[in-house]
Image (cartoon, rainbow, N blue to C red):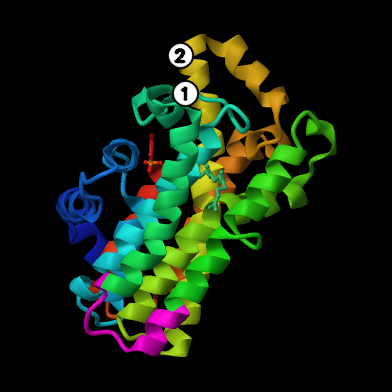
Amino acid sequence: KPAAVVEEAAFNFAAYMKERATLVNEALDKSVPLQYPEIINESMRYSLLAGGKRVRPCLCLAACEAVGGNIAQAMPTACAMEMLHTMSLIHDDLPSMDNDDFRRGKPTNHKAFGEDVAILAGDALLCLAFEYICRETRGVAPERIVRVVCEVGKAVGAEGLVAGQIVDIKSEGMAEQVGLETLQYIHEHKTAALLEASVVCGALVGGAGEPDVERLRKYARCIGLAFQVVDDILDITQSSEVLGKTAGKDLLSDKTTYPSLLGIERSKEVAQQLIADAKEQLSCYDPAKVAPLLGLATYIGARTN
Ligand code: GRG
């Protein structure tokens, strides 16, 4: 068996994720102090510390380590990724967007604090993410930090998350007209862009050269798209389990997803191929150094929540 496969099998991924998520949660807890005006900080903390798998920060720390960096160099960037992800969830849940009542097992931010506060909490987390990278990063050349800030800005703005969200919103109710190309555009921007930035920025603060950055970017693009294909599959299979087979089937025609276009079995194959392609990008590295990135790819392909 290839060394990377052996290394991944020996790697205790569950213990690794638990340890890394704990470190990230401790740093996030300190990042938003409960100071005046308390209401905004309470609202930011409510969503930021509400749990979540912490996939983006873990990817950022793992990419930093893969290129020989120290995780302390990447922790502020890793936290910023979670701040951005959280703010996007707060805004996504608003009545003017998805109008959701629950997120991460709790009432959504606007249900708990009101729409006005929720909008501002999202705005404040967006600003804090950039401030936090610039203020808290140590031992990284300023030019690298500037590059990280550009990379992150592009990933969340009108060429990234916002682009994916606007195309998604404007495609609503037009399931028949949304083909694979548009679906892929939405996923690449709404979901994959931030996963990609997490990996690329982790590599940048870890001191990566250009070939490493581009190889890891390809890895991230594959797992980013796989993440959303799996999300689409889980939407169908978990709804079928909860609601019974007929209701689950109804969801297939509600909006365009990978399963609605390709069927569940073919969607599973697409996800697994993307995970294999992602791992292929890591084949030239020391297997011990990339075991966490390999483990994260396996996890994203096999996740159940
Ligand atoms: C970024 C400026 C700016 C605005 C936000 C609302 C919006 C624009 C974008 C929506 C982005 C969005 C909600 C994408 C879905 C991403 C996704 C797959 C979420 C689920 O991620 P998990 O499974 O969740 O990692 P946890 O809770 O585990 O963190």
> Which residue ends up furthest to the front in the rendered image?
36
Image-quadrant location for residue 62: bottom left
Name the foreground residue: 91 vs 214: 91
Name the foreground residue: 104 vs 145: 145
Left or right of 32 on screen, residue 228: right
Name the foreground residue: 107 vs 210: 107
Q: Residue 195: where, in percent of width, then height?
A: 46, 59
Disc 2 packing (10 Å; few <14; some 14–19; many ≥20): few
Q: Label 2's element?
A: helix
Vertical placement of 150 versus 20: above or below?
below
Q: What number of labels is visible?
A: 2
- Labelled pair 2, 1 in contact (Cβ < 8 Å): yes
Q: CA distance from mark 2 to mark 1?
A: 6 Å
Q: Dot 2 corresponds to which residue?
A: 242
Q: Which residues are magenta?
A: 136-147
Query: Looking at the image, which residue is at 52% across and 51% down?
Result: 226
Type of residue at label 2?
Val
Q: Residue 243: where, in percent of width, then height?
A: 51, 10
Query: Looking at the image, which residue is at 59% across and 30% down?
Result: 98
Left or right of 9 on screen, residue 90: right
Q: From where the camera sits, is residue 221 visible? A: yes
